[in-house]
Image (tube, helix red, strand yellow):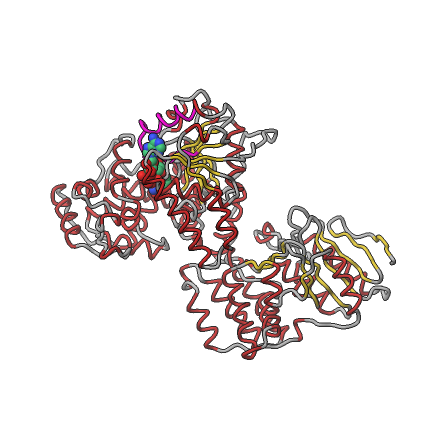
Amino acid sequence: MVQTQAQAGPLVRGETRDGVRILTLENPPVNALGSKVCAELVRELERAETDTAIAAIVFAGANGLFSGGADVNEFHSPAPAGSKNIRDVIASVEKSDKTFVAAIDGIALGGGLELALGCDYRVGGPNARTGLPEILLGLIPGAGGTQRLPRLLASRNPMNNGLAGVQMALDMMLKGETKNAKQAKGMGILDELVAGEVVARAVELAKARAGTKARISSLSFIVLPSLTALAHGMVPPEERGGYAAHKLIDAVEAAAEMEFKYGLAHERRIFEELVRSAPAQAAIHLFFAERELGKIPGLSSDVKAKEIKKAAVVGAGTMGTGIAMVFANADIPVSVIDVNPEQIERGRKNIASTYEGQVKKGRLTPEKAQARTECVAFVGDYAAIADADLVVEAVFESMQVKKEVFAALDKALGPEAMLASNTSTLDIDEMASVTKRPDRVLGLHFFAPANIMQLLEIVRGKSTSDEALATATALAKRLKKKGAVSGNAFGFIGNRMLFDYIREANFLLEEGATPKQIDAALKEFGFPMGPFAMSDLSGIDVFYKIGLEAPRVPYRTSEIAARLYEQGRYGQKTGKGFFLYENGKREPLEDPSVNALIASESKRLGIKRRKVENDEIVQRCLFALVNQGAQLLGEGIALRPGDEDIVWVYGFGFPWYRGGPMWWADTIGPKKIYEQILAWQKQFGAHWQPAPLLKELAERDATFAPRPKVEVSN
Ligand code: NAD
């Protein structure tokens, strides 16, 4: 075997084996195909082109993965003239007469898979994971993915004129789904799935096929209008975050109708347009905000997270049961205790039926479901959880009960164990005060249903140690949650902002709007449900009790929810709240008696009801949200506006394509919001008090986002 090392750039390793040139991407952590990597690849390909001793080329990736795709950082700024990108690399492949093989270990995502699709053959290892997830950033694949994937899958799945393959390609790109090695082989994305050394097999294949070409670009396929119409019907409308999805379907249509090179140009035009679009900018902002979450200013990098090997949960209610599943899903053994044996039984059943349901839907193998069910142990007392590294308390929302639990846990658990509360609002420091380990006490605020919702607020008490905080942020990642750090303020970030949003929604009721109108206006804005359907879902009783413990505010609050509470209208759980729920259904129906109750409240307060416009509803509720967001930033409760955006997108369903409340505020302009709040202060009173940070930004005409915004088109 001939083996030579030849120079390549620092980001691409070159090696020649038996006339096969192996180009290995070495750009940790994910071998991103940024402009420097692409420039090195293009240079390498130019060199190989003139070298007659090289008959074939294998692309591979170092560090156990192929490539995570384009460098998202480069989406922010226009590429300098002459710089290279993935399209240039694939164009060099396309025009070469040599044979190309992609050796896919680990991930080949986005541009990574597009490069592999530019090759003649794809060989994958058992860990291969392929996908074109650009849609999750409000984009479409921009380096030929929309043109090559349907061609490839139509040819590999020829029944019914290849339409099944086209549908697979559309589905995969529209959902941004990643396929594992077996799935990718079954669909035809991978030509071979090998158990052994992937690069070695790719080299063998390259040698065997040297001199032949099997470019996907030479294939053709058809689509039927009924197929694309179906696809258009399955994605959200353009104005509700579906813009890129509709464009993606157009690009696939172009791939079927146009000659390859024109289809490619069409895809590129769409990509260039999308990358500047407001939804993509919002999604890219969220992508970076998520990466910032774990970065805590002032936390030394010497601080090491502790490994959580065993967890425990106190309280087997709605939250406790869900939290136990979160640990089980991450393969962390967890013990659950509750004072009420009926709740234990309910919890046990709930967990079993959740996993059974996932098996039925094909999301989990029966073996995995059994392993996860067995990961959760229901135990009798504190002695049985004494060896846990972390306990999450999820008992009733009462400081009295929580303090008793914390005192008991402090006595029962080893001195190193961390104690966390899932409280929605209560003071973490007060709970810590009854323990001898306040440095190892913090809040871990999961959202309901805990095993589904991706958000986790990590609440830092005044004594919480850096180690405990680092452990919590590392744990959040392991639990596949987005862990946003919050200071210890009533309601933390999410609920604190929520209270002001709901306050304003209630004032709007008194002034003339109805729950139905307000919910519809905010759904139109993009929330999955309005504030009143949400109150009914969470429980009006829950909000009422939170209100009793909330710090007093120096202004009047609406009493409408209290009237409903007094009537036993707790929301969905009692079949009526702000809305009616018939026969256990979840659909909120307007209740004339609630509208009458609201009208009588207006009368009692001497408010003359008026027609409230939907625009006013959206502005009043959202400016209240933004103002509280600014307040929390000013107080240091929230670290970054991006953290608040993550909390609201992943915890409260704020539409992702608007980037979260603070990103959205920047598109309106803090100055405009500040001036409007001052006007409302005159009109409605002192509860409209602009946050100091909002005022400061308005005076400088600045934005919340630290980064200058890219020019955005709609
Ligand atoms: P829940 O009423 O469904 O469950 C509470 C459980 O705690 C019950 O099973 C009860 O028997 C048990 N319990 C009470 N005292 C106990 C004690 N001393 N020792 C052991 N077990 C005890 O309540 P939930 O909705 O699961 O809420 C639990 C906590 O999570 C609360 O602090 C709540 O504010 C918070 N939270 C709730 C939600 C939500 O949407 N439900 C969301 C986030 C956070």
Image position, residue 346 (x, y; %): 34, 44
Q: Nearer the viewer, residue 22 or 27?
A: 22
Residue 74 lies, in percent from the top left, at: 60, 52
Quarter holding residue 315: top left
Total numbered circles: 0
Task: Note whether 346 is above or below 163 in the view shown.
Answer: above
Q: State left or right for residue 491 relative to residue 230.
A: left
Q: Looking at the image, is 126 positioned above or below residue 382?
A: below
State the extent of the magenta-drawn residues as a range. 392-410
Q: Is residue 690 left or right of residue 273?
A: left
- Magenta stretch encompasses residue 407: yes
Location of ligand 1 given as a quarter of the image = top left
- Note whether residue 490 is visible: no
Eyeballing the image, is 70 above or below 414?
below
In the image, residue 473 above or below residue 233: above
Horizontal and vertical percent for residue 409? Answer: 42, 26
Name the image quarter holding the N terminus: bottom right
Task: Between residue 287 and residue 384, name the one nearer to us.
Answer: 384
Q: Is residue 590 left or right of residue 123?
A: left
Residue at the limit of the structure toward the bottom, as seen here? 161
Position of 172 with respect to 515 (left or right) is: right
How would you classify the magenta stretch by its main secondary structure? Answer: helix
Q: Quadrant of residue 166?
A: bottom right
Picture coordinates of residue 496, whole percent (x, y):
35, 37
Quadrant assignment, res 646: top left
- Indicate yes or no whether the magenta region holds residue 482: no
Quarter of the image containing the C terminus? Answer: bottom left
Residue at image point 76% right, 56% down: 23
Q: Residue at x 35, y 42 (%)?
A: 345
* Residue 46 visible here: yes
Q: Residue furthest top?
A: 436
Q: Viewer-proximal residue, 4 or 678?
A: 4
